[in-house]
Image (cartoon, helix red, strand yellow):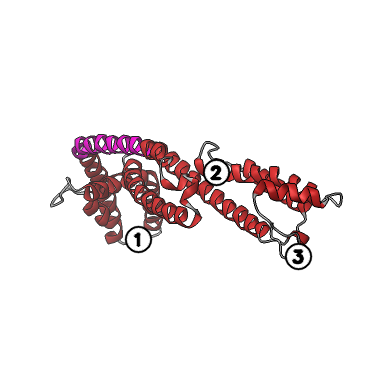
Amino acid sequence: MKESSQSANTKDKDLTDIKQLISVVDAVNQVNERSDETLLALDQLEETLNFLAVKGNAKESQIKQTKKLFDDWNNLKKLAKDIKKEVAPLVGSETQKNNNQIQKLEEEMKLFAQQLRQREFYKYDCGREQALVKLDGVYSEIKDLEIKIENYGYTAMKFGNPNLIEGCNKQVEGIRTECGNMKMLWDHISVCQQIFIGYQNNTWEKTEPFEMEDEVKKLMKTLKDMKVDKRANAFSGILDEIKKWLIFLPLISELRDPAMRDRHWNAIRAKVKSNFVVDDKLLL
């Protein structure tokens, strides 16, 4: 009780310091929350001593000490009631201040989420390596926002308004999800680009257009199944690349047809203005 009394007492405390104010509020709340439990324990102690007194086994000092505990507890409850009334204006002021900060942060985060789509990593020509660097930068910004959310949320909880921070939590969760989706998109872009480079380095004789077309169709399905902003330039960029391959590979299938004759190849050479030779050194 002595410790609780010291914690709840406002003497020699700077209540303009939010941490000290919360400490006092916590101490007052603990007294109120433990009221029934403490009173029950004191009643049980008193009954036990009364029983022992009848048997002649209770000391007078013990009975006096029990009475003092009741007095101390009543004084502590009165102190808690008085302190709660004393700090109420400060709690109200700090609550309003914290609420305003939470509202402002939520608006800032909405703007942050909107402007996020203007970042460089949404553009296809950014490239995966640079895009991941930029995304790491966003994660650092998110951590700063989460620190503010934690601080404001802690104060809101201590002053009895824990739900006020939920809007900010949803906003930061949405931003994290968006960044995670963009990372997955860039990982997929990298996979696609590596496969396409491999195709281009295939020799003509080892080119398997039907198998390649099936693989590209799977790449397309994976891309379309992604939960990412389909309007993003990075998405449309790799989508266009995949579409080109899906147009190109059926043409390769036709060129691989045994019915192709020299006159057909000559017509192609004339069209592309290159006198290439169809042998085991010819690359796709």
Which residue type does callout 2 highlight? Gly
Label 1 sits on a secondary structure element that is loop
Residue density around tag 1, few if under 14, some if 14–19, many if 20 or more, within 10 Å: some
Which residue type does callout 3 highlight? Asp
| Mark 3 or mark 2, earlier in chain | 2
- Looking at the image, residue 149 sits to the left or right of residue 21; the answer is right
| 201 and 86: which is toward the camera | 201
Q: Position of residue 98 (x, y in %)?
A: 27, 39
User: Which label lies toward us, 1 or 2?
Assistant: 2
The residue range painted magenta reads: 85-109
Which residue type does callout 1 highlight? Ala
| Mark 1 or mark 3, earlier in chain | 1
Question: Would you name the residue on which mark 3 appears?
Answer: 280
Give the numbered dot on residue 58. Answer: 1
Q: Quadrant of the C terminus?
A: bottom right
Q: Quadrant of the N terminus?
A: bottom left
Question: Would you name the residue on which mark 2 appears?
Answer: 237
User: Which label lies toward us, 3 or 2?
Assistant: 3
Disc 1 and disc 2: Cα gap in Å? 89 Å
Q: Is residue 140 above or below residue 115?
A: below
- Tell me where residue 130 sits by quadrant: bottom left
Residue occupying the point 43% across, 56% down: 133
Residue density around tag 3, few if under 14, some if 14–19, many if 20 or more, within 10 Å: few
Q: Position of residue 68 (x, y in %)?
A: 25, 53
Label 3 sits on a secondary structure element that is loop
Residue occupying the point 74% across, 45% down: 251
